[in-house]
Amino acid sequence: MRSAQRSARRALAGRTVWTVNSTPAGGGVATMLHTLLPYLRGSGIDARWVVVSAPPQFFAITKRIHNRIHGHVGDRAPLGAAEGAVYERVLASAASELAAVIRSNDVVILHDPQTAGIVGPLKATGATVLWRSHVGADRPNALVQQAWDFLLPYLAEADAFVFLRPAYVPRGLPAAPTGFISPSIDPCDPKSQPMPDAVAGAILEYAGIARPSETRTPRTFTKYDGTEGAVGRPAEVTRVGQGPQLHTNRIVLHVSRWDRLKDPAGVMRSFVQHTLPIADAHLILAGPAALAVSDDPEAAEVFDEVRRDWSLLEEPQRKQVELVCLPVEDLDENAAIVNALQRQANVVVKKSLEEAFGLGVTEAMWKRRPVVATRVGGIRDQVQHGVSGLLVDDPTDLAAFGLAVGKLLHDEQLARRFGRAARARVRARYLPDRQLSQWLELLTRLVDGSDPVAPMSRPGVP
């Protein structure tokens, strides 16, 4: 690590590393950047983070691209010349602003479909431009190729590409060095730092997620800057009754954006139809406030669909299911609530139809939580079936998923064994030192002219 830091400082001296994405919070890319950027700067690299601002029409198009790269039709609207014109017009403004501050010796890392359209304009500054894709499909179909046909012309001038998994590399990608880096979690940040059980309970009770008790434990945590913070905003909770009582009621937790590919409605159906009949537990479906993620225009619509399905459940079932919208005004506070939720859960689930990587799985595994998830995307790289969790092959098999959850609720010894193995798996593969070393060596090789793919073939990446 220290050798990589020294080499990167020498190679990048006098250069700025710009990283560009489309939202400061609410998704895996933002979470990853919150982790990576401070470590880059702490290594002596002038690393900066820029967020592209755009109107809803732009994000409707990029969400369409996102869904189709995952092999799903999404909103079924077209992805043609008219959409390309909107995409280019919005990004022309962003490219103009960035080009005014980027120098010819700088390095730019662009993230995901929202930024592909500025590869060419930023290359015109003389900078080195790398495009990083976090999305893809295990089984490419015509929809996947349609999305890539839209994006590939914008990527022609990129100096290098980074993907999460080899399966995500599209047919027809321009000839440039291409490698693979998995994200990581930061065990020091508010979402993953150690948290006493009593503090986690106090946070969830104050947020209105768990049933109130007589506890007077402070709901404090350490913020990312090292200062003390306290949870001061409640969550928006949809439920019947008072919710689960901690340490008495068992909790099954699903945390994600309100996204159809995360299938929160399917999680709920699986739970009430196949887990509740064999195991008494509460399901918490949690995500950010539905209008809080700027680059995800479908979130509010998906949440409304889930809430409608919840309202149609029989009352005894509704009493066992909570829908939770977490506050996002303070990102450290939001992270602390997620931390508390994961630590109080008996089982954490991720029933994604498609998944790029699944940092929520990594976070839960680090906290020794047993995980039940679908065998898709980066989840299959993280969870070893029968060793550190349970994987369900068919994301649409509600019975198999619900019964797997019930199995871990019943067998606490197995759940604890999975939890210990899960933490060891994350410690070995998904902590910042591995990711930081790969990025430092990649950036060094990009600017000194040697093969930039070499550092991306180490253990810890697919």
Image (cartoon, helix red, strand yellow):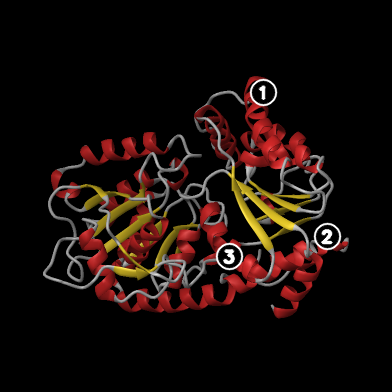
User: Which circle's residue, 1 or 2, is located before the other in the chain?
Assistant: 1
Dot 3 amino acid type: Pro
The quadrant in which the N terminus is found is bottom right
Q: Could you say which quadrant of the image residue 302 lies in? A: top left
- Compared with 342, 292 (above or below) is above
Give coordinates of residue 410: x percent, y percent.
Answer: 27, 70
Dot 1 amino acid type: Ala
Assess whether mark 3 and mark 2 are in contact (beta carbons under 8 angstroms).
Answer: no
Q: Residue furthest top?
A: 82
Q: Nearer the viewer, mark 1 or mark 2?
A: 2
SS at badge 3: helix
Is residue 381 left or right of 254 when viewed as pictured? right
Q: Could you say which quadrant of the image residue 248 lies in? A: bottom left
User: Residue 38 — which label?
Assistant: 3
Visible in this render: residue 256?
yes
- Compared with 211, 288 (above or below) is above
Closer to the camera, 59 or 227?
A: 227
Q: Name the residue carrying label 1.
A: 85
User: Residue 447 — which label?
Assistant: 2
> Looking at the image, which residue is at 32% across and 63% down?
341
Mark 1–mark 3 Cα distance, whole angstroms, equals 36 Å
> Looking at the image, which residue is at 46% across and 62% down?
361
Give coordinates of residue 220: x percent, y percent.
Answer: 30, 69
Q: How many marks?
A: 3
> Looking at the image, which residue is at 16% across and 42% down?
314
Q: Residue furthest right?
A: 449
The quadrant in which the C terminus is found is bottom right
Visible in this render: residue 389?
no
Dot 2 amino acid type: Val
User: Which circle's residue, 1 or 3, is located before the other in the chain?
Assistant: 3
